[in-house]
């Protein structure tokens, strides 16, 4: 669970996110969210230009049945432990910078597997540090990155993904060490 101050996304006096079904129990919400996002992940994702709008459409696609704000940048500061993600007032600027860099790199097309793992790892690390949404960043990141990998001619073998290893690598990248994330991506190619 994220730490947030004065969080209008949550029901008063709780850490449960307001949701379309008005579920007030965290365990029930977690189960519902997992089920519907898994079902949405099996459907075709929206097409787009691999830009910030397209990325927001991915998040909306996954979470449209759960949260009214699906696909919209968060407006509160959030952290995991004592590590804060990008402050909301800078999200748009940082997302535009990151996706402009992605466009300038020609969306990683034509890169060797090693180069793709390296640049892809950096992209994911940066995207994770921005954490533009109040919830669901990891699932949106992975879904979008898999789409980006397909577009770059480097499809990921997601069935080989170990969620615990991936999470550990994402945390390491947030703390400044992108090598484990690069290794995970290389193993998925």
Image (spheres, rainbow, N blue to C red):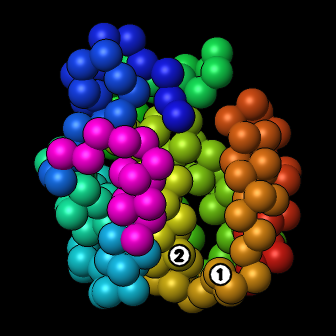
Q: Which mark is residue 158?
A: 1
Q: Residue at x 25, y 56 (%)?
A: 66
Dominant SS in magenta: helix
Quick one: label 2, few (<14), some, or many (20+) residues within 10 Å? some
Q: Which x, y percent locates residue 17?
A: 31, 36
Does residue 74 appear in the picture of this structure? Answer: no
Depth check, front residue: 71 or 24: 24
**2 vs 1, front mark:** 1
Q: Which x, y percent locates residue 188?
A: 75, 79
Q: Which residues, given as a range, are shown in magenta? A: 22-35
Depth check, front residue: 108 or 52: 52
Give yes or no for residue 34 being in the magenta stretch.
Answer: yes
Q: Residue at x 71, y 52 (%)?
A: 167
Q: Which x, y percent locates residue 141?
A: 49, 58
Q: Residue at x 69, y 70 (%)?
A: 116
Q: Is residue 74 positioned above or below 122 on the image? A: above
């Amino acid at each position: 669970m994220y730490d947030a101050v004065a969080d209008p996304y949550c029901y008063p006096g709780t850490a449960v996110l307001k949701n379309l079904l008005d579920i007030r129990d965290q365990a029930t919400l977690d189960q519902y969210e997992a089920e519907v996002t898994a079902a949405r992940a099996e459907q075709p994702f929206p097409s787009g230009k691999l830009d910030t709008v397209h990325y927001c459409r991915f998040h909306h696609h996954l979470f449209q049945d759960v949260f009214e704000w699906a696909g919209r940048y968060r407006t509160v500061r959030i952290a995991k432990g004592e590590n804060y993600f990008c402050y909301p007032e800078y999200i748009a600027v940082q997302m535009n910078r990151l996706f402009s860099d992605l466009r300038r790199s020609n969306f990683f097309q034509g890169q060797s597997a090693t180069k793709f793992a390296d640049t892809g790892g950096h992209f994911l690390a940066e995207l994770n540090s921005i954490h533009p949404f109040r919830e669901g960043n990891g699932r949106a990141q992975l879904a979008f990155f898999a789409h980006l990998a397909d577009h770059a001619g480097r499809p990921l073998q997601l069935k080989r993904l170990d969620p615990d290893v991936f999470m550990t690598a994402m945390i390491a990248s947030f703390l400044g060490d992108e090598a484990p994330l690069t290794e995970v991506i290389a193993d998925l190619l």
